[in-house]
Image: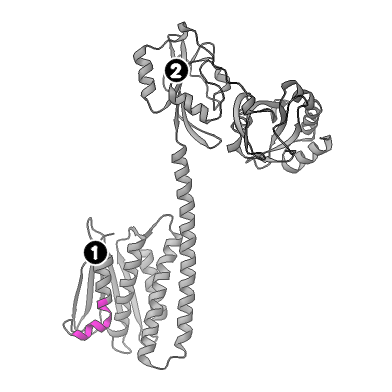
Amino acid sequence: MSKHSTWVLCHKYTNLTEDEIACLQEWDEILPVLSNAEQSDAFIDCLTSSGKSAIVVCEAKPQSVPSSYSKPLLGMLIQWKNEPAVTRSMRLGVPTNGVKAVCVPENAQVVQTVEPIFFRERQIGVLIFEKQASLVSVSHKQIPQDQYVLSDDSAWLMQCVDEAVFMVDARGIVCFRNEMAQKLYEQLGYVNDILGMEYSNIFLDNLQVLSQEKGNLGDRIEVSLGNFHLLVKQILVNKNGITFAVVMQDITDYRNQEKELVLKSIAIQEMHHRIKNSLQKVADILSHQECYVKNPEALSVLQDTRNRVLTIAAAHQELMEAPEEKVQLCAVLERICDNTLKYASDPLNPVSIKLQGDDFLIDAEVASSIALVVNELVQNSIKHAFSYGKPGTITIQVTENELFSQIQICDDGKGFDVTDVQSKGLGLELVRNLVQEKLCGELSVSSDKNGTCVTFDFIG
């Protein structure tokens, strides 16, 4: 290892100054001596410029014992989840002793002792000593009997709580811990039982010990260490030799579920985006085909199909822009109206659409079904309700109710005979099936010479 290598790595990956890099180069010169003295692999890691990782800028292997590594690690980026001791010392600027880590190249476990390195009161890196986990003996410190200050009833109660609990005496030594605390620190990588250990080696955040005058509960602080997310609370005791207690709740699963939900949400948004684009392409193809269709009935079917595809695409557009799997109902209906007027209306037969009433959030699946129903009804009105050349108005009224919400679509057209079987050709059969099967609602139609009103209810 040369001074030049340390200089190159620090300049390329860190924000260290020239003086700070020179300090690390001095450490690099004595690193082989330290490695032999500790009979351990020795490394110096520095925080990268992004602050999201650390990089090995110096290394030395012991000569008296086998190294844990068969290849050089110089320039390797570490993952916080693999080295909790480095994470703790890098974040808090304190030593950490006897914590397991994952040796990534060899996929083996090592035990780390980590010391922060400072230059002019600023932390510039950490010094790491590593030994193979199989070569590290586990020590069990015994707390003198007179230090065991909890009654049998209190100790039993502490073993039953779901949180990790430990207590620290006036000397700064852990004088009690429940089984949850023991298991938690084992999972965090600590080789030895924390009972009898100095608190300075196990605290996970720079919590200030509460003053005796406060005498109240400390605030909960969320701490991340490796793969773990913990809520930590410090409680002032000052009784029976105990200075304070620490309560820790493992919320790792909860935070991981949050991350999964965020990733799923992003994936769903991307899915809606792709579906919307695909549907738009299908609609464009159908529009292109209309130019080659001469049969009026076939052309009408083709146009209806295109407009239905665009309706579904509009619903997916709203879902793509929504923060959750719920959408604003009126936003969906506005897109439906715009698309319908754009593709289904005739310039020589002017029709306007009014949207009024309540606006509220509904589920995505419900929104898609409502969009198809409203699209079908509005298209039917545009095609059949108005005499050629006369303007018309279609009004969409939305009403939100506690149990069933309602949408009413009325036109001021010429009306039709609702008892005539030919009315099924207006698309009402499709609409009725959608309302009953997808929206769990009912459909009603009324029509006279002053126009037609179609009302349906749905569960939002």
Using the image, tell me which numbered label, if any, was put on residue 100: none
**For this rendering, which residue is in front, 460 or 75?**
75
> Can residue 180 be spotted in the picture?
yes
Residue at the image point whose x is 75% and y is 33% from the top: 59
Please, is residue 151 above or below residue 233 in the view? above
Residue linked to disc 1: 440
Q: Is residue 407 visible?
A: no
Q: Secondary structure at mark 1?
A: loop
Residue 445, percent from left and from top: 20, 75
Q: Nearer the viewer, mark 2 or mark 1?
A: 1
Instruction: Please name the amino acid that badge 1 sits on.
Output: Cys
At mark 2, the secondary structure is: strand
> For the stretch drawn in magenta, what is the main secondary structure?
helix
- Which circle's residue, 2 or 1, is located before the other in the chain? 2
Residue 236 - label = 2
Q: Magenta residues, as a range?
A: 421-429
Compute the Cα span from label 2 to label 1: 58 Å
Neighbours of disc 1 within 10 Å: few (<14), some (14-19), many (20+): some
Could you say which is closer to the camera, residue 404 or residue 396? 404
User: Residue 128 sits in which quadrant?
Assistant: top right
